[in-house]
Image (tube, helix red, strand yellow):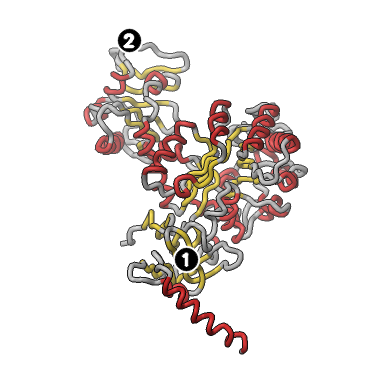
Amino acid sequence: MPRSARLLPLLGLATALQAQTPPADLIVHNGRIYTVDQNRPFVDAMVVKDGRVVFTGAARQAMTFKGAATRVVDLDGRTVIPGMIDAHGHLGGLGSSLRTVDLVGTTSYDEIVARVAARTKDTPPGQWIVGRGWDQNDWADTRFPTHEALSRAVPNHPVYLVRVDGHAALLNAAAMRAANVTAATQDTRGGRLERNADGSPTGVLIDDAMSIAGSKIPAASDEELRAATRAAIAEVNKWGLTSVHDAGVSRREVAVYEEMARTGDYSLRHYVMIQPDDSSLATFFRRGPQRGLYNGKLWITAIKAYADGALGSRGAALLEPYADDPKTTGLVRVAPERLADVATRALRNGFQLNTHAIGDRANRMVLDAYEKALAAVPSGDHRFRIEHAQIIHSEDIPRFAQLGVIPAMQSSHQTSDMYWAGNRLGQGRLLGSYAWRSLLNTGVIIANGSDFPVEMVNPLISFHAAFSRQDGKNWPVGGWLPQEAMTREEALKSMTIWAAWAGFMEKEVGSLEPGKLADFVILDQDIMQVPAELVLRTRVLSTWVGGKAVYERKAAM
Ligand SMILES: [Zn+2]
């Protein structure tokens, strides 16, 4: 009683002060808001001013920030989470795949011609149109197509359409002209042209002969790169992503991103990992690490290196031979001394080093190189990372925590690889694979991601896999090696605050709390509560970056 009596005059004072503070831009209320803020994890209202969260808590208090111009969003019981962060994706790869005409699933040559013709509407004449995914075995007439129908429908753009398996390409007449493909063109070593009876090319190039035309397709211009980037950002926003850690970006791409972030709408917190060649390193070391450039749009603070290849193609570097190919232990793609040298220079210049390592030999090699560099340049808060960290020898699992190395893992890879990973590795070695729980138990955090466009953009695929260890069809029952699952709370953190921390972004994003940027997502159901098998039915209703809606789902019919 005495306590509330003392508070009363104070509350009166607070209200009086509030009346003088300028009203909020946005109030979101009447929903289930998961803030990922330890102090206040679950609230029903949030207030935004000047792009930042200024209050989270009870709706009644939130409404005291309301002014005449305040936008009020009634969630009607729906769910809000912080904007999701993909800690390992490829925005450039996504952009170019979005610009490629998708021919997968076409059931006739006419359909292919129609899809390419549609693309000419937003492509200047003379510019190449690239498509991918046709398969004449799916058509009524299963012979290879010939160029005439395509050339008639698309006379003014060179067209290059790759078969579903990547081993053949169909050209139109304009492309054949541009690449000088004629009856006189010789077959190549390891490749050939399909020809009519008179020797003239039909338009189909096989295997190595594809390069006759493929090599003539110009690299994307700056304008094309900008268009692809805009398309990729729109795509990731659509899936509830507001930040992406971009795993390997050229200097030219960084320049394009910088110009876009500086001059226009750029609805992404974009953390780029620069390439590890000496001239890129020299350029960016001179500038020093830069975080939150252009109003929290661009982070240039990390280097991407590669230690090995991938498991599917037996390129992952293993300590012992592959179970299904005892002649090989995979590929090492960097000399250990070079990696230690780059790591040392990164530490001296205040950069992170994020190294791709899939196999247990590669992971050990990277940990050794990091250890050596840290001995030479002791550094408290380096946040070095290993990208993927898929297969780790049991003795190396505690070394992540000991060295302060962050495993940046993609739960989606576990559910994509689980059907055949056992063949490659044998059952014993699987125990240290996709070992999220074992790593978390040592005290590290895990930055989650998807590796789009290798995997799908939808971050909820990794969220779901992280705690269920199941694919989209909820297979296998009970989960694959379920002892390595995260909890649902950890899964949410791995795509928000932990991913933010892994990019030196945690002061700006990763949770909804006063002072941070108002990046959030409204979902049509509560992903923290619905049964696991329903999580992938969740729809993103809207995505907000800095308090502005950058994606809004059209009302369902
Ligand atoms: Zn990748």
Taking depth in this image into account, of 458 and 377 the one nearest to the observer is 377
Q: Secondary structure at mark 2?
A: loop
Residue 74 x, y percent position in the rendering: 39, 70
Residue 400 x, y percent position in the rendering: 71, 45
Q: Secondary structure at mark 1?
A: strand
- Furthest residue to the bottom? 1
Q: Name the quarter showing ligand 1.
A: top right
Taking depth in this image into account, of 354 and 63 the one nearest to the observer is 63
Query: Between marks 2 and 1, how big is the CA–CA gap?
Result: 64 Å
Q: Which residue is mark 1?
A: 79
Taking depth in this image into account, of 162 and 540 the one nearest to the observer is 540
Left or right, residue 445 beside residue 269: right
Answer with the quarter of the image where residue 302 lies.
top right
Q: Which residue is mark 2?
A: 184
Looking at the picture, does residue 309 appear above or below residue 453?
above
Does mark 1 have its CB less than 8 Å from ligand 1?
no
Picture quarter with the C terminus: bottom left
Residue 231 x, y percent position in the rendering: 37, 43
Does mark 2 have its CB less than 8 Å from ligand 1?
no
What residue lies at 60% left-to-right and 53% top-to-bottom? 498
What residue lies at 54% left-to-right and 38% top-to-bottom? 273
Badge 2 crowding class, 10 Å Cα cut-off, few under 14, some 14 to 19, many 20 or more, is: few
Taking depth in this image into account, of 311 and 503 the one nearest to the observer is 503
Which residue type carries mark 2?
A: Ala
Residue 278 x, y percent position in the rendering: 58, 26
Badge 1 crowding class, 10 Å Cα cut-off, few under 14, some 14 to 19, many 20 or more, is: many
